[in-house]
Image (tube, rainbow, N blue to C red):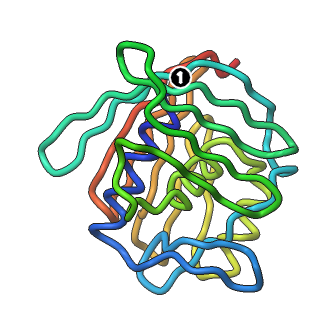
Amino acid sequence: MRPAILLLFVSSMFYVTSCATAARGNRPFVYLADNSRFMLLPSREIEKPMDMAQYISAAYGGQDFFINAWVKADITGIEMILINELGVNIGELFFRDGLVTFSSQVFPGSLRPEYIIADFQLCFYNPIMLGRALEENGLALEIRNNTRRISKGNNLIIEIIKTDNSILFLNHHRGYIYTIEGDFE
């Protein structure tokens, strides 16, 4: 549940700090940097299917956030069920057949769930396809050891550091950071 909640948090930050999400040719996209769109990739590009609980801790604007999520992701799509500390469902996010849907009584209607899916894809999708999609919009993906770095020219935009049990996601361009904990082996 961790990636989903963190991703929801991140999405709400994007609403405040970035341009609106729009669709081009029926494929949703987000702005990873000014004037640099990232088209959401098809579900078949996931590196490794997952069905697990996740814990997300995030920091943005001097505040810390903690979220639980159950995440199921495979070639058919992404499902994230957000759960509070008491085990109560506080939101659901789905990405299937190129469509993103989100429902929650807790998070505002202005939340842009496409950003959550984009961050998830940057962490867990096939690096070859990610690199191609990023390159189409003037961005570059560099992978060294367990670190993915996304840049525009000489500017580092996003850095993702992966281990067997955690992912550290640093968005230098938007000024937020989060950690996703789970069994990613």
Front one among 165 and 95: 95
Q: Residue furthest front?
A: 105
Q: Residue furthest left?
A: 62
Q: Secondary structure at mark 1?
A: strand
Reply above or below: 165 against 4: above
Residue 181: image location, x then y, percent: 49, 22
Front one among 154 and 158: 158
Q: Residue at x 56, y 41 (%)?
A: 147
Q: Quadrant of the C terminus?
A: top right
How packed mark 1 is, by other alpha carbons closer than 10 Å (few <14, some 14-19, many 20 or more), is: many
On the picture, is 171 further left or further right than 81? left
Q: Residue at x 34, y 65 (%)?
A: 173
Query: Which residue bears the numbered disc 1?
Result: 54
Q: Residue at x 81, y 59 (%)?
A: 42
Residue 37: image location, x then y, percent: 57, 78
Reply above or below: 111 against 20: above
Q: Amino acid at mark 1?
A: Gln
On the picture, is 91 further left or further right than 173? right
